[in-house]
Image (tube, helix red, strand yellow):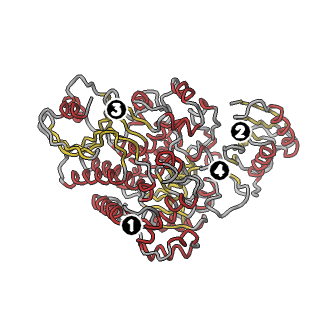
Amino acid sequence: MSTVTLDNAKVARQPLVSTNSWYEASARQRVEGLLDANSFVEFIGPEMREMSPHLALFDLPEQFDDGMVVGLGRIDGAPVLVAAQEGRFMGGAFGEVHGAKLTGLLRAARDMASMPVLILFDTGGVRLQEANAGELAIAEIMRALMEARFAGVPVVGLVGGRSGCYGGGGLIAGSCSALAVSEQGRISVSGPEVIETNRGVEEFDSKDRALVWRTMGGKHRRLIGGAEVFADDTIESFRNAARYLIELAPAPTLDTLEAEQARLAQRIHDFGDCADALDIWRSLGASEPETIPALSYEAFVALADRLQEPRHDAR
Amino acid sequence: MTLDKILASLFPAGHDVVRERGLIAGQGRLPDGGAIAVIGVEGQTPVGVEEAAQLAGNVIEVIKSGGNEPILVLIDSGSQRMSKRDELLGINEFLAHLAKCLILADKLGHRTVGLLYGHTAAGAFIATALATRTLLALPGAEPAVMDLPSMSRVTKLSIDVLKEKAKSTPVFAPGLDNLFQTGAVAVTLDPASSLADQLQAQLSRPAERDDNRDQLGAERNGRPKAADIARRVYELARASV
Amino acid sequence: METLNYRNKAQQRAKGTRRQAIVGVVASGNLEVLVERILPDGECEVDIRTAAEGFGEVWQAVISDFVERRSPGGLKLSINDGGARPDTVALRLAQAVSAMEGERT
C-alpha cells in the first residue's frame, strides 16, 4: 500500500460493488477507471469543503465537492484535464460552485494550450435552487470551452450516466470538439416531462421510455450526427472513445462553423418532416428501424457506421 | 419600450432592420457613422431549430463580410421551443451552434452586444443574450431560467414559498434585478435617454479580454463563490504542470 | 437541517497510512462520508449534517457501535446525509474505515 502525502491525496469513492459499467459507476469511479492508475490529482477536492452556499435555504443537504470533480490525470502517460459530474447528487445539476470548477478548468486549459479536456457529463441541467448561477455557469463554461478549442485544445464529452445530458448540459455538449455517447446516454435540452407539459401527452408521453430513448438517446444521437462515437456501457469503451476523439479534434475556424451550419441546415431539410426517430432512421437507409433499439452494441456500431459516417470537421 | 421605439431610439441615423416570423435582422447606423449588424428575436418567440439556424446564419454572414462591424443582439424571446420535433432534430446542437457563432464573431473582431428588452428563458437565454460579450438591458426586461410555476412543480414547493425564499437571495428567481445582481447583465440602460448614445458609449469602452460576468456577480453579491472557485481551480491547474 | 457531533475514544489507531478518503454520495436514502486522519490516535470524531432532523439518538447508537467494532482512532469522519437508514450509515462508516486501512471491497 503506497504512502500518500497530504499534498497529493488521491481520493477515490469506494464502490459498493466493483463495476465496469459506466452507467452504474460514480463520477469518481469513472475518473479512476478512465485514467492511468494513481495519476489523478484533484483540484478543490472534498476536503476543501467548498459546498453550495444556496442549498441550506431549501433545507437540502450539500455534498463536499458540490457534485463536480475536476483535476489532472494521465491517459497512456499523456496529461489530460478531467471534469466529472456526479449524477446522483441533485441530479448532477449545475450549481454555482459545481459550474465554476469546470469554468476554471477550461480557462486553464485555454491558457496552457498543452493538454485536452474530458468532460464526463451526467446532468439534468441547471440546479433550480441556484438557477441564475447555474445558467450563468453554463454560459461561462461554453465561452471558456470555445476559447480553449480556439487555442487548439480538444474538449471531448462523454455521455452515459443516469441523469443524461440535459438542459444547459446539452448546450455544453454541443460545444465540445466531439462526443461519445452510450445507449444509456441521453442528450436533450427540454426534458421529457417538460415537453409533455408543454405539448400534451399525445405529442410526447414522458413515461414512454422507448419514445424517450428513440428521441434523445445515444443510438439516435449517433445516427443523426449528434455524437461522433457510440460507446458500450463500459469504462473501457469510454476510455477508448476518449483516446480516439482526442486525436481527431482540430481547432475550430470559420470553416468549421460554416460546415456545421450546412450540416444542421441539411438535417432540417432531410428530416424536418419526420414525425419520429423511426422515420429518420428509415430515411437514413435502415430497412428495419424498429429493430434498432434492441440491437447489440456491436451490431449497432456496424449499422451506424454503414448509415452515417461521423464527421470531425463540423462541430 | 416597444421594439419600434427601441429601434428608433437606437438608430435615429437610420437602419434597415427587417422583422419576419419573430426574427430580427439588418443593420443600423451609429452616431459616429459606423455600422452595426443587428439580429434578434421579438414577440417572445420561442427559439427552435429553424430560428437558431437562421440567426446563426446571419452571424456567419457578418463574419464573412470581414472588417470589425459589431453585432447587436436584440432579445425578446421565449425559451427554446419545447417540442418533440426540436429535440428529435437535436436542438442542443442548433443552440450551441448559434452561441459558438457569436463567440467566434466576437473573437474575430465583431464585438457582440446583447440588448435584452423583453423576455428570454432557459436555452434561448444562453444561446442569445448570454452568448454576447456584453449584455445590456432595458427596465421591464424579464429574463428567467425557469418561470416560478414550473419551478414550483418541479421542486414541489408552492409559489408563495419560492417567492418568500427569493426575498433573501437573487440566485434563483426570475427578474432583471436578479440577473443584474448575479452578473448576467452588465448595464441597465435609461429608456428616457438616447439609446443610440448609450450604445455608442458601451461600444467605446475597451473590450474586456476575459469573461467578467463572474466577477460582476461577486462584486454585486449575487454570486459570492463562482469567481473565486474558478480562479482557484485555474491556478491549481496551471501550477500542476 | 441538523448538525450533530460525536467525539469518542477509540481503542486503537485505524490501520494504514492513507490520509483521506471519501465514500458514498449525497442522495435520498444515501450519504457521503469524508474521512481524514487528523486526530490523535485514540480519538474519533464524527461530524454530521443531515436533512432528517431529530434522530440524534439513532446516530449516537450507530456511531457508538461503529467505534467499538472498528476502532477508528485518529479519524475524523464528516458526513453529509440525505436521509439514509441506520444500516446504510453503518455500511458507509465501515467502508470509510476500510478505505483508510487500504482495503477495497
Q: Position of residue B12 (x, y in %)?
A: 14, 32
Q: Which residue is mark 3?
A: B186
- Chain of the residue under label 1: A
Q: Identify which amino acid the numbered label 3 is placed on.
A: Ala
Q: Secondary structure at mark 4?
A: loop
SS at circle 1: loop
Element type at marker 3? loop
- Residue under the point 48% across and 44% down: B235
The answer to whether one can see residue B219 in this image is: no
Kindly check if marks 4 and 2 are in contact, taking CB atoms under 8 A apart as contact.
Answer: no
Q: Residues within 10 Å of mark 1 (few under 14, many from 20)?
A: some
CB atoms of marks 1 and 2 within 8 Å: no
Please say if the residues under marks 3 and 2 sit with CB atoms less than 8 Å apart.
Answer: no
Residue located beneath label 2 in the image: C78
Q: Is label 2 in a helix, a strand or a loop?
A: strand
Which numbered mark, 1 or 4, is in the foreground of this view? 1
Chain of the residue on which disc 4 is drawn: A
Residue A31 x, y percent position in the rendering: 59, 56
**Residue with the mark numbered 4:** A11
Nearer mark to the viewer, of 1 and 2? 1
**Res A79 visible:** yes
Q: Is residue B3 above or below residue A273?
A: above
